[in-house]
Structure formats: structure tokens, C-alpha cells
Image: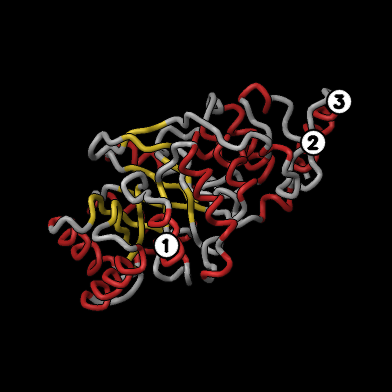
Amino acid sequence: MRSRRRFLAIAAAAAAAGLRPSLARGDTSAAAAPEAGPLLTRPIPASGEMLPVIGMGTSGSFDRPADERDALREVLRRFLAAGARVIDTAPVYGEAEAAVGVLVAEAGAREKVFLATKISITGREAGLAQFQRSLADLRTDAVDLLQVHSLRDWQTQLPLIRALKAEGKTRYVGVTHSSNGAHDDLAAVIESERPDFLQVNYSVAEPAAQDRLLPLARDLGVAVIVNRAFLDGALFKRVDGKALPPWAADFGIGSWAQLFLKFALSHPAVTVVIPATGKPDRQSDNLEAGVGPMLPPAQCAELVQIFA
């Protein structure tokens, strides 16, 4: 109840200050600018290569047949126009890999994007066969990042991915999960295996990664990709009709989507966040979170308290 009362107090203060109540995903006014940029960039610790801080996930959003991809073309156009690069996908995301492959090829953008996919199967030969299918669907000879999806059979797949890296089939090695219950296992794997990338869930409502995983990744020089920054869209239902905190404008934040993304990016261990969308206006909105100042610890702590 305390967090709810505090949230309502913040909303009332924002309304009194005349701030626009944006604020949930149904309102597209925050995406008035067709493109954002230049996006902030951060280094991959293993190499120093710089990545724009806003990437793009494809789970659900890019699972579309060929005759339903017009909106996705515009989503990708705005993404590239802003200078964004990281596209994360997986063979278990339905038609997403095929859609990414076709649209990136149509745009002539393979050299512009940082393409990340995953192995999500048990057994070395099965993993290798799955990756070969991914390459065919993605219309490429190699990817930039190959990850063990949800730590599935990681003792087998991580050595396979390292072998593929040695062959030039991937430039970086990673592990992923999207559940708080896997954080201890993730910590153990990155501590023992030192992959180039860790992908993990982190949001105002699921901040547990900041307790151990994110500091550990930073100490070990592991790049961090954040998934579920919107809690699969559930966060927007919680803020429907609510105004932004009164301090949001001080950080260039014009929508709840931007606030949720900027929260994730404000942790110093985070390299890039990958919100998924199949709608162009939401893509523009997401990209706006990659510019301007980050949130100080006090604001981040306040958000965690509100959404606890």
C-alpha cells in the first residue's frame, strides 16, 4: 500500500505541474520525432567495440509471415536511421529469424547491424544443426553474437559456440536467461566461464539482477544485454493513465517506455537494452531513451520502490 500511495502522490504532483500524462503504450504522442539520435554508445569489455545502447528484441514482435511485414520494414528503417545496431533473435521465436534475415537483406544492412542469435537445444550435433538453420534463415555466413539460450545444455553448447567462434562463425560468445530463478546459475556460469556477453532480465519490477549479477558482470568484464525491461508489456498496464514522475522531464523522458528503458540503462554494468516491438511509433519512442542523461541512483531506487 505504501508504494501505491507514493505512486499516486507522484502522479498527482506531475499533474499539478502540468506535465503531460503520457504514458502508457496506447498514447503515441511521445513518438512525434520520426528518429532519435545520436544514440549513446558503450563498449563491449572484451574488445572495446562500441554499441548503441538501444537495441531490438524480436520475440513475438517479428514472428510474422511474409505478407504481414510492412510495419516491420518501417520498424527496421527507424532503427537503422537512429544508428541502432543490436538485433537479438532466436530459432525458437517462430518466424522471427526468417523475418530478420529478409528485412535486413532488403535494406542492405547486414554490415550495419550487430546480429545476435542463440542455440536453444540439447546435444552438440543438434546445436550445430540448429545454428546452420539460423544462418540460412538470417541470410548470413556468420553472426556477431551467439548465445546459449536460457542456459540450456550450456556445458555442451558453450564449448560448441567457442569452437564456432574460432572458425569465424561468431565474433562473441554469450549466455542468457529471463527468469529471476536462474540468476544464481547465471552467476556461477559467468564466474567460471567468462563469456563475452550476459543477457538477463532487469526492470523496475524485476531489479534482482542488480544485487549480484550486474556487479559481477562489471567486475569480470562481461557485457550485459537487458531483456524484459517492460516485463513483457505488463508494466504498461500498471501505469495506464498515470503521469510520469515530476522529475522525468529533467532527464529528457517523455513516456513510460523511455523511463523503463532508461532505468535499465542507468546501471553502469548494462551495455544495451533490447525492447521488442513490431510498431513503428513505439520504435521511435524506444529510441528516444538512448539519448540524454541517465538516472541517478536516487531516482532508480524510487522507481524500484514504486513498482515493488
The answer to whether the residue labelled 2 contacts the one labelled 3, judged by CB atoms less than 8 Å apart, is no
Q: Nearer the viewer, residue 274 or 31?
A: 31
Which residue is identified by label 1?
102
Q: How many marks?
A: 3
Which residue is identified by label 2?
21
Circle nearer the N terminus (1, 2): 2
At mark 2, the secondary structure is loop
Circle 1 or circle 2, nearest the eye: 1
Could you tell me residue 248's position as x and y percent?
67, 28
In the image, what residue type sits under mark 2? Answer: Pro
The quarter of the picture where residue 232 lies is: bottom right
At mark 1, the secondary structure is helix
The answer to whether the residue labelled 3 contacts the one labelled 1, judged by CB atoms less than 8 Å apart, is no
At mark 3, the secondary structure is helix
Could you tell me residue 194's position as x and y percent?
24, 49
Inspect this view and state whether residue 279 appears: yes
Residue 16 numbered mark, or none? 3
In the image, what residue type sits under mark 1? Answer: Val
Separation of marks 3 and 1 at Cα, in angstroms: 48 Å
Separation of marks 1 and 2 at Cα, in angstroms: 38 Å
Left or right placement of residue 177 versus residue 264 in this view: left
Q: Quadrant of the N terminus?
A: top right
Circle nearer the N terminus (3, 1): 3
At x 64%, y 37%, the residue is 303
Q: Nearer the viewer, residue 160 or 141?
A: 141
At x 37%, y 47%, the residue is 113
- Binning the other alpha carbons within 10 Å of mark 3 as few (below 14), some (14 to 19) or many (20 upward) gives few
At x 24%, y 40%, the residue is 46
Circle 3 or circle 1, nearest the eye: 1
